[in-house]
Amino acid sequence: MDFLDILERHERVFSDTGFLDVTENIYRDFFYDLRTYDDVDKKKYQEILDLIQLKIEWYQQPNVVSVDGVVEEHSRFANLMSEKLRFLNQKRYSDKTKRELLDHIVRLQHCVVKRSRHSTYHSRNTSECLTLVKFVIERAEQEQAKEKPFYRKATRFEDTHADEQLVGCALHSALYENTPCAIATSDTDIYYIFKALRDADPFRNLNIDIASLPITIYLRKPSGNIEVIESLEREKVHYDDLQYA
């Protein structure tokens, strides 16, 4: 099974920022450590190039949808890549070809931003969806759903709330548009946010069982396998033999 199999299973797939990344920190290991163009490793460059091209193709699929927070995260990294190029341009270098390679890869990353923005989810009732997303954000903060000790990371960036937006939009899709959907992510916070919502008063008062909603979570693991949480009610997940194409 490959990524296209996910698309064939679901009418709507909400995509998180890092779902397609083959290994964690692949961007950081390649870009952040560069000091001159001569440091560019062509093998790693090809891995990055393949990944970015895969992301562009992914967002071209008609049933892949994004959210504002995901677009912001893609844009944030594209800007960091551009900053790195400006830094490298101040250094002396001997390999013009490697400079052209990096220019190409940065342009493609900006294409990822455009494609993800074009795929942004537009609900039939924007106000209703925004209210639901706001509630998810407040509930996640109240329950500290994203504050597991092993998930805390020092960062100079503000939280885009992409996870909460993905959850809120998926709930809106399933509840108000009667459209079953999936969330494709590499972030376990998504699952913990759903767990935090199970006993929330608005859903309980309306007799809405979060666990029974037609929402599937595809959780990518660093190994390349993906855990498929078929029901939000299950405490354990089973492994679908999903490998990278």
Image: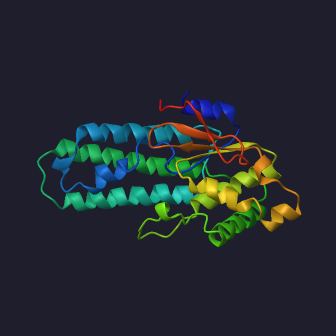
> 59 above or below 5?
below
Q: Position of residue 173 (x, y in %)?
A: 75, 50
Locate residue 26 relative to residue 220 in the image: left or right.
left
Q: Nearer the viewer, residue 52 or 142?
A: 142
Q: How many marks?
A: 0
Quarter holding the N terminus is: top right
Residue at the farthest top position:
1
Seen in the picture, residue 118 relative to 42 is either above or below; the reply is below
Front residue of 240 and 87: 240
Q: Nearer the viewer, residue 130 or 214?
A: 214
Looking at the image, residue 53 lies above or below residue 114: above
Q: In the image, 151: left or right of 104?
A: right
Seen at 11% across and 48% down, the residue is: 94
Residue situated furthest right in the rendering: 206
Q: How is the image coloured?
A: rainbow
List the single residue furthest toward the front: 236
The residue positioned 22% from the left and 58% from the top of the image is 88
Q: Residue at x 52, y 67 (%)?
A: 159
| Image x and y of residue 192, in percent | 63, 57
Q: Position of residue 50 (x, y in %)?
A: 39, 36
Q: Residue sitting at 59 percent across and 58 percent down?
A: 163
Image position, residue 125 (x, y; %): 78, 58
